[in-house]
Image (cartoon, rainbow, N blue to C red):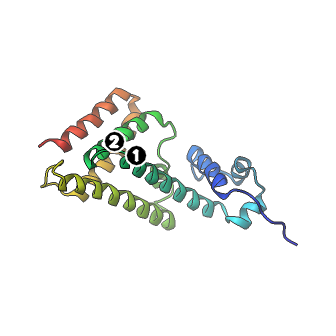
Amino acid sequence: MARCVEFNETEIIEKATNVFWEKGYHATSMQDLVDAMQINRSSLYNSIGDKHALFIKCVSYYADAAIKETKEKVAKETSALQGLIKIIRDKAAWVVDCEKGCLGIKTIFEIAPEDVEVRKLLNKTNQIYLEFLSELIQEAIDNKELDGSEDAALLAEYIMTTFTGWKQSFILKRDPIMIKKMSEYLIKTITKA
């Protein structure tokens, strides 16, 4: 008779996510994962599958948590523009404070070029975030908080690619003041009348 596998899947996904985030996909071994999750290999294989299946779950978990956190923060703001400003300032702070970088960006460069399933997942999660950002920008435009001639989708894409550039700059220069200045410059640029 098979033994019943009992563990909190969310908890083990969080632990595995941290391992992948720290080491990258290729450098992470199954032993690294089972050690971090504190479950045995057979439980992992029987409940989740192989390393790749676990990685897909981890990237999905990471992306879902990030968008949920962003939406919760924006919901507390008094306007769409204030929500957008909050996102920009939070991202600048995160770029400086998060030594591990972005799991999504790491995955794009490490795995996505060769892995169609990962690429599709990242495209899907990126699209969800872009749509949320576009809707927020469009709301700010509709409320006359931003210039009505702006293309919300293009501006959302521009802002997201800017975030990636900040991380690159910080990795190379380690200048938190420059990141803060760039974030304030972005805010100034998109809010000028």
Q: Which dot marks residue 73?
A: 1
**Residue at left offset 34%, top offset 27%:** 177
**Residue at left offset 33%, top offset 41%:** 86
Task: Count the labels in the image.
Answer: 2
The residue lying toward the viewer, choosing from 70 and 175, is 70
The residue lying toward the viewer, choosing from 147 and 162, is 147
Q: Quadrant of residue 183?
A: top left
Mark 2: which secondary structure?
helix
Say which label, 2 or 1, has the lower sequence index.
1
Rendered view: 124 above or below 155? below
CB contact under 8 Å: marks 2 and 1: yes
**Residue at left offset 42%, top offset 33%:** 96
Name the residue that disc number 2 marks: 86
Mark 1: which secondary structure?
helix
Q: Residue furthest bottom?
A: 1
Q: Amino acid at mark 1?
A: Lys
Q: Is residue 132 left or right of residue 147?
A: right
Q: From mark 2 to mark 1, how far is it between C-alphas?
A: 8 Å
